[in-house]
Image (cartoon, rainbow, N blue to C red):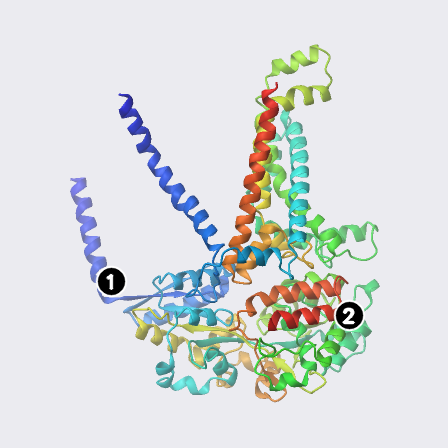
Amino acid sequence: MLKRSLLMLVVLTLLVSATVSANTITLNFLEVMTSPERTALLRDLIAEYEAMNPSIKINLISPPYEQADQKATLMLNTNQDLDIIEIRDYTVKQFVNNKKLTDLTPYYEAWSEAETLTPVAIAAAKTVDDTPYLVPQAIFIKALYARTDVLAEYGITEMPETVEELIEICRQITDPSKNQYGFAWRGKGATMKFGDLFASVCVDDVANSEFIYSEDETFFLDPGFKQGMEAYITLFKEGTPPDGINWGFNEQVNGFVSGTTPFLIQDPDAIPLINNLLGEDKYEVVPLPVGPHDFTLIDYGFCGMGIPSYSKHKEEAWNFIQWISSAEKNGYFNEHWGPLPVHRTTFDINEHFQGKHYQAYRYEMANPDTFLLKTYPLASAKWPGWDVVYETDVQSVLLGRMTLDQMLQKWTDYWTK
Amino acid sequence: MREQSARYFFLIMIPAFVLLTLFLYYPIIQGTVIAFQKYTLFDMTNTPFIGFDNFKAIFTDINFNFGQIMLNTLIWVCVSLALQFVLGFILALLMQKPFRGRGIYSSLVFYPWALSGFAIGLVWAWIFNGQFGLVNDILLRLGLISNPVGFLSNPSYAMASVIVANIWYGVPFFAIMLLAALQSVPAELMEAGKIDGAGPLRRLFSITIPYIKPTIISTTLLRTMWIMNFPDIIYAMTGGGPSNSTNILATQMINKILKFYDYGQGSAFGVVIMVLLFTYALLYLRLTSGKEETF
C-alpha cells in the first residue's frame, strides 16, 4: 500500500515538473564579482524580473570571488549550461579568443538605451576588436580621497591638484614619531594602477598612445618616466609607512580611516565602506592630481554581462540583460553596490549619485582632455603576469635590492622581447 | 571457494579503484601532460606540445629566481616542520597526564587544525601588520620598540612571520598524533625503566621515542609533504613578497596559474614538487627503515 502510494507520488511529481518545465525557461547566470551583499542585491533584482516574466526562471550561480574567474573560464571552456555570464576587463579577451562570447552588435542596434551609455561604458563594451561583447554594468575609475579633518590640523585646506603638490604635502606632514604619514601606499595587487599615476603621467607621449604601455610601445626609458618613478620612490621613503610595501586594499582603507595616511587613491566602491567606518563628513573626494603635462590617466576597470556563444536562450538572456542595464535598474544596482553606473542619465535621475563624494568622478568623466581614458593592453599575453612582475620589482627597488635603472630596463625587455 | 573469494576481493576493490583513478591518477597524469604543453588561458585553442620549454622557462625566469624560490621552500619546510614537531611533542607529553579541564584544554589546542589555511593567513596578516598589528601594539606598549616593525614588509622578518603562523597551525596535528601514540606505550615498560634507575630524560629517549618511532616517521613524512604543498598561509599573508622573499614552489605555482594564466608553467612547478617529494619520501623511508632492521 505504502509502496503504491509512493510510486504514485513519484509519477505525479515527475508529471507536474515536466509540464512546468515545458513552459518555463531557466537561464543560468554566473556572477564573478561575488560578495554576499551583491549576491543578495542581484537576487532581489532577479526576483523582480521573474515576477514580471513568469515564464523565465533565472538560476544565479555565485562562486566565491577568489575562484570566480576560474570557474567562469572552466564553465565556458567545457560548454556548460550558461546563458548569462559576468565578464570583467581581465577576462573579456580570453573569452573572445576562445570563441565563447556572442557578438552583441545586433542587440545593441535595437536597444534604445544604448545611446545614453557614457563614453567610458562604450569603450568598455568594445574592449576587444571594437566589437561589443558585453553590456557594462559597473565602471571603476580612481579619484583622490583626502581626510580633510586630519589635514586641517596641519593647516592644509587646499587639496593638491598636481602630483608634485600631493607628494610635497605628504612629505611635509610625515612624522614617524607621531605615526603620521601622508599617502596610503599600495604594495600588493594591481600596484601598477597606482605607480602609473605618478610615473606614466610624466611622459608626454603617453597622451597620444593607445595604451599606457604595450608590446608595441613602452615609455620606461623615457627620462620623464624615470623622474616620475624617482618622485614616487621619494613619496614612499618620505611620506608613506614602510609597511606600505605589503599593503593591499584593506590596509590602504585602514590607513586612511585611522588617519595615519590621510591621502588615498581609490575606486568609488570605497565610498560606502569609508562612510560606514568614518561617516560622510571627515573626508572629501577630489579629482586625481595631474602630472607635469597637465593630464592624468583614467584607467577604467569594468564588469558587464555577456551571452555565451553556445547559449540556447540568447533572446531571453538579452531581454534580461537589457532590463537590468536600464538607467534606472543599473543606477539602483550601483547605488547599493558601490561602483559608477553606466548611463550618463543615471547621474540626473539618481539622488545617490548626485551626492558630493561622486562629483569628482563625474568631473573626471566629463573632462576627457585632462583625464585621459587609457587602459592597459588587456588583450596582450604579457598583461596577466605584469601585475606580479611590477609588484615584485618595485618592492625590490624600494628595498634596495635592485636599482631603478635595472628595473626600467627589465620592464622594457619584459614588454618588448 | 578460493577463486570465489578472490573474485569477491576484486569486486569490492572496484569502487575505490575507480574513485582513485578519477580523482587522483587522472589529474596527476593530465597535470603532467600539461607541463609539456603551451597551455595558457589566453589561448586555449592552441595548446601544442613544447617539450621541456616550460621547465626551462621556470628554471631561468629572471623575474622569479628559481634558486631563491628553492631556498625559500627549504627554509619554509625545515623550520616549520622542526618547530611544529618539537612543540607538538612537548604539548603531547604535557597532555598525557590527566588534569582538570584537560578535555576543554585539548580541544582548544586542537582548534587551529580545524581552520582553513587562507583564513589563518588573513588573521595572522593582521596580527603581524606593520602599522595596526597586534604584535606591534604589544611591543610598543611594552616599550620594547619605538617604531612599528614591518614584519611582513621587511624581507628579514617576512619569512619568520609566515613560519610562525604555520607553526601555530601545524602544532596540533603533531600533538594529536603523538598523544595517541604516547598512550599506547605500555606502562610496564616505563615501570621497568624506572626500577632500572632510568631518569625521565633517559626514559623518554630510550623507551618512549623508540616505541612511538613508527608514528614519528609517518607523521613527519606526511607533514613534510603537506607543508611543501601548503601555499595558503603565505599567499594570504605576503603573496610571496616582499621582493620574492617568501615565495615558495607552491606559491609560485599558484602565481603562474592565477596571475599569469599559464597552466603549462604552473604544472611544471607541480611536477617539480612531485618529483622532489617522491624522491624525498623514498630516501626518508629507506633511511628510517634501514635502521630498524639493525635492532
From the viewer's perspective, is residue A193 above or below residue A73?
Answer: below
Q: Nearer the viewer, mark 1 or mark 2?
A: 2
Quadrant including the C terminus of chain B: top right
Q: Which residue is mark 2?
A: A239
Horizontal and vertical percent position of residue A389? 63, 65
Q: Is residue B160 left or right of residue B269?
A: right
Report, in whole angstroms, how far the alpha carbon at label 1 lies from the one at label 2.
63 Å
Q: Is residue A379 left or right of residue A151?
A: left
Horizontal and vertical percent position of residue B37? 47, 58
The chain under label 1 reads: A
Which residue is rendered at x = 41% and y = 47% of the image? B26
Which residue is rendered at x = 72% and y = 62% of the image? A396
Q: Is residue A121 left or right of residue B220?
A: left
Horizontal and vertical percent position of residue B146? 84, 56
Q: Which residue is mark 1?
A: A21
Q: Secondary structure at mark 1?
A: helix
Which quarter of the picture shows residue A328?
A: bottom left
Whichever of callouts 1 and 2 sits on the residue coming sooner in the sequence is 1
Quadrant including the N terminus of chain B: top left
Q: Residues within 10 Å of mark 1 (few under 14, many from 20)?
A: few
